[in-house]
Image: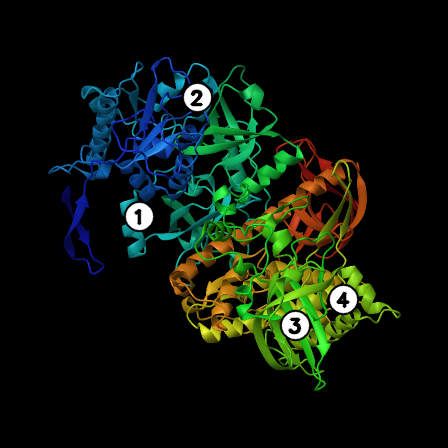
Amino acid sequence: MLTSRTFLKRTRAGAVVKVVREHYLREDIPCGAAACRLCPPRPAGPGLGLEAQPSGAASSLCPGPHYLLPDTNLLLHQIDILEDPVIKNVIVLQTVLQEVRNRSAPVYKRIRDVIGNPEKHFYSFTNEHHRETYIEQEQGETSNDRNDRAIRVAAKWYNEHLKKIQDEDKIQVIFLTNDKTNKEKALEEGITAYTCEEYIKSLIANPDLVDRLACVSDEGKEIESGKIIFPEHIPLSKLQQGIKSGIYLQGTYRASRDNYLEATVWVHGDAEENKEIIIQGLKHLNRAVHEDIVAVELLARDEWVAPSSVVLQDDGQNEDDIENEEEKENILKTAVNKDMLRPTGKVVGIIKRNWRPFCGMLSKSQIKEARRHLFTPADRRIPRIRIETRQADTLEGQRIVVAIDGWPRNSRYPNGHFVKNLGSAGDKDTETEVLLLEHDVPHQPFSQGVLSFLPKMPWTITEQDMKYREDLRHLYVCSVDPPGCTDIDDALHCREVENGNIEVGVHIADVSHFIRPGNALDEESAKRGTTVYLCEKRIDMVPELLSSNLCSLRSNVDRYTYMIHTLILTRNSRCLYVDFNRFPSHRLAFSCIWEMNHKAEILKTRFTKSIINSKASLTYAEAQMRIDSATMNDDITTSLRGLNKLAKILKKKRIDNGALTLSSPEVRFHMDSETHDPIDLQTKELKETNSMVEEFMLLANVSVAQKIYDEFPEFALLRKHPAPPPSNYDILVKAAKTKNLEIKTDSAKALAESLDKAESPTFPYLNTLLRILTTRCMMQAVYFCSGMDNDFHHYGLASPIYTHFTSPIRRYADIIVHRLLAVAIGADSTYPELTDKHKLADMCKNLNYRHKMAQYAQRASVAFHTQLFFKSKGVVNEDAYILFVRKNAVVVLIPKYGLEGTVFFEEKGKPTPRLDYNNEVPSLTVEDTTLRVFDKVKVNIMLDASNIQHQKIRMVLVEPKV
């Protein structure tokens, strides 16, 4: 049956047009019930459909067999309930799915995943195309009312339809809605309807499920009563008008880790003025949560403030103690230089909430048998959350997950609900799960749908695979990596050619051969974006069969690679017929090959897909030993010496061009083989061979970037590093001045030269400290699409163009670059998404986010293992250097451990010393002792486990004594 749907649409020019679309109605759409013989068989697809005899939790309200049918708001707000294993046999209507998709992409993805889970028996019913359940919108009826009516019509049809099934136990459909009006209408129409709370409370064997109910009222609004604390949020329609007229500014809200009464809003748009707005004080923060999109009103200039140097953490138990908050706010308001004042504003409304489930711990109420408790998130930027639970005794000392439901004006903290228990706090597996969840790292096992696209084993290369490849197995190729590395992306070779020049090859695992565009494996890799390296485990971007086996360029196994050859073509560059039966283990590579002279000047560059056989998998130390050995002169060692010699020349050229050599202390843990606890902690020692590999990877990335940009000026995936704004360098310049050194920051070259000259014969570590401080001044490097940006420059590398090509096993960006390069050299064909700059720009946005989160997760893993290390050490006394000075603390670096920590001078229960902070120097005088940046001090290091939620390394100043 054919009908039509008519609706009005506003064009970009502002005109209103009438749109008429054909709408097909069918009679053969199955109801999904396994016992139904009236409907045609259910087509193959996700999930198994509804059970013939519904299993699940027993309900006192509905003792008979039943299916559940939720409305849109219930699904949006109570998704945690629906995901619970107890809830099964749920009908999800097309009307509901479409509304959820329009209103919340994360919830839509979660419900799609539940529908695809065969154990849950959720069924998606296409009611909008079923002849008996489709309804037209009536005159004067809102879209929302029409959709509510459509849901009730579908619920009624299901009940009547299921009655026709010849079965002893009649299956009933229960309509779940939290909308009071919708429920009343359903009951009037003879539909059995309950609120979510009524149904969940009726589950006889699952009383704890009540804790997972979202705390919202009938209409989905927050429950409000009592004393008003916060100003009212301006409605979205008025906010949009105000943003358009310039009264308000729209931006991303970033809460401070160090001061819970301060935040920054990064304003969207290209305007340079008022790009960063400071928000100070509880009422001005006005219930915004980290990463929310907010509307801000600028305050008058005489109300502007400077960023606070006070460290304030919300450690109070009394949620209604607003007077105490006002006292703390007064601490922020100290006299400052007018030059330090920044644009200051207040949050007037929320444009988009970016709430997610938060990990943390329950702060149990002191009131006996209380059900209301505060939840303290692991992330200090997130406010405490008030939840109701009957399981407080069980959950105390556990890491749990909580979701925010709303934040009423009368509540100091937002309301939320318990989602799940992760395990005991301090347990290694639990803490690892927490840091992965908190940093949004996808770490679930690869699904069967993803694994189905892996090559079938045993895998061998075919003649078709070799069609566009060179056989380079005769070359003395080797890899140089950290110890224990199994996902080896890159290998190198170097040899002299007949004309006296040098051929250098960088060979990269050809991952794109195995991951084809658009399949489930490709989509999962794109979503993950990067491999995440934690201290004890690795969260792979691609399945292990690829990362550690077929794509890993381990020695004495033939691999496919993509090689950039920096040497002239070999005399015999044609691919000859190979008897593949003689090579049971074949691997692929993409190679970049240069021909160079002895001054490391590139004469020719070419790119080819290839097959290689790595002759040695070396660690940095092993490669260094070969280079330094007086007795080793084999082909691999000779190749390494040639590479090392050229790398030194290449590095000097880069630095002469203005590339920065910065410093960031990295640590390595030595683990106990049985307990896997850290037994030693050392800073990583870098060797010449680290630099050798780095130089050729950089060179390959630059060569490939230029090639793909030349071929695809609008669609090249590149990487840039923006120059920092001058204000970023203030702390560095001031710190250097305390040691009578001048740091010039006009350009990267001027900065590099200043750092090279910044030496002190009496203080050899000073230059390292300056470089560490310079690293903190830098902007984040980002991926971008060449057709969407004009600034390609990489500030840190002083390169006009750059990309990532050399690590496709662990970075999805490199896979895209491989595909572009393959098309550019005629080794593969293109596909629509590869030449769509808008889709590439969206992909870059996800990749930048994933890379940032991976970095944070790695740091969190190091911090946790550092705590484990010091837990068994007691009090350790070590030399340290002051990196930053705050109003009430100093941040120090301990070179031996590469460890950073904060020394506080205010302690609970102890008299507060006299503190005098000077921002110009910068310095902090504690009583009569003045502490400056770069001062050498001695500190005691110990684990402070007084707060099990936020265990931390505590540092106490020993010398000088204060």
Assign a secondary structure to mark 3.
Answer: strand
Percent x, y of residue 133: 20, 33
Assign a secondary structure to mark 1.
Answer: helix
Percent x, y of residue 654: 65, 74
Assign a secondary structure to mark 2.
Answer: helix
User: Would you name the residue on which mark 3 appears?
Assistant: 505
User: Would you name the residue on which mark 2 appears?
Assistant: 210
Question: Hey, which residue is sitting farthest left in the picture?
Answer: 139
Q: Could you give the CA–CA distance between mark 4 and mark 2, rounded to whole angstroms?
A: 61 Å
The amino acid type of the residue labelled 1 equals Leu
- The quadrant the N terminus occupies is top left
Assign a secondary structure to mark 4.
Answer: helix
The amino acid type of the residue labelled 4 equals Glu
Name the N-terminal-most of marks 1 and 3. Answer: 1
Name the N-terminal-most of marks 3 and 4. Answer: 3
Looking at the image, which is closer to me, 485 or 194?
485
Q: How crowded is mark 1: few (under 14 residues within 10 Å), some or many (20 or more)?
A: many
Residue 688 numbered mark, or none: 4
